[in-house]
Image (cartoon, grey):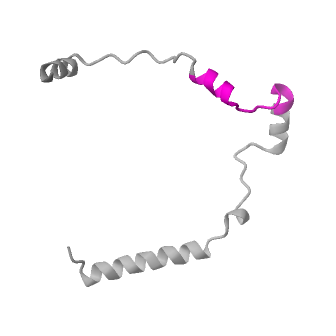
């Protein structure tokens, strides 16, 4: 499939504009220091109240093995019948 000259020109201009914008934007380290509300004082308060929170392989495994609160998914009767017929 051949691209028309206009299409190629449009793609080039969009690529050039994107590149220019990327080069003009500030580096991530100079962006605003938005902490999402997790200020150092809030983190310190939480650690004081709860202790240092760290995820380990064991704690992740324990959480993953916990039963789900979601009820089991019930099969749609029509879908089940179709699957049985296709077997």
Quarter of the rendering occupied by the C terminus: top left
- How far across and how far down the image is residue 59, in percent? 68, 25
Q: Measuring 25% from the left and 19% from the top, which residue is drawn there?
A: 76
Q: Quadrant of residue 64?
A: top right
**In the image, farthest residue toward the left:** 85
Q: Which residues are magenta?
A: 47-64
Name the side, left or right, on which 24 lies relative to 36. left
Query: Residue 54: within the magenta?
Result: yes
- How far across and how far down the image is residue 36, in percent? 69, 46
Name the side, left or right, on which 15 lies relative to 83. right
Q: Quadrant of residue 5?
A: bottom left
Most frequent secondary structure within the magenta stretch: helix
Which of these two is toward me, 71 or 66?
66
Image position of 26 with respect to 81: above or below: below
Image position of 62 with respect to 17: above or below: above
Image position of 10 with respect to 48: above or below: below
- How far across and how far down the image is residue 75, in percent? 29, 18
């Amino acid at each position: 499939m051949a691209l028309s000259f206009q299409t190629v020109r449009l793609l080039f201009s969009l690529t050039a504009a994107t590149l220019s914008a990327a080069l003009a934007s500030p580096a991530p380290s100079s962006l605003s220091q938005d902490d999402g509300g997790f200020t150092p004082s809030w983190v310190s308060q939480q650690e004081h109240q709860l202790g240092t929170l760290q995820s380990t392989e064991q704690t992740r495994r324990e959480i993953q093995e916990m039963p789900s609160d979601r009820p089991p998914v019930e099969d749609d009767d029509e879908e089940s019948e179709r699957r049985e017929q296709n077997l």
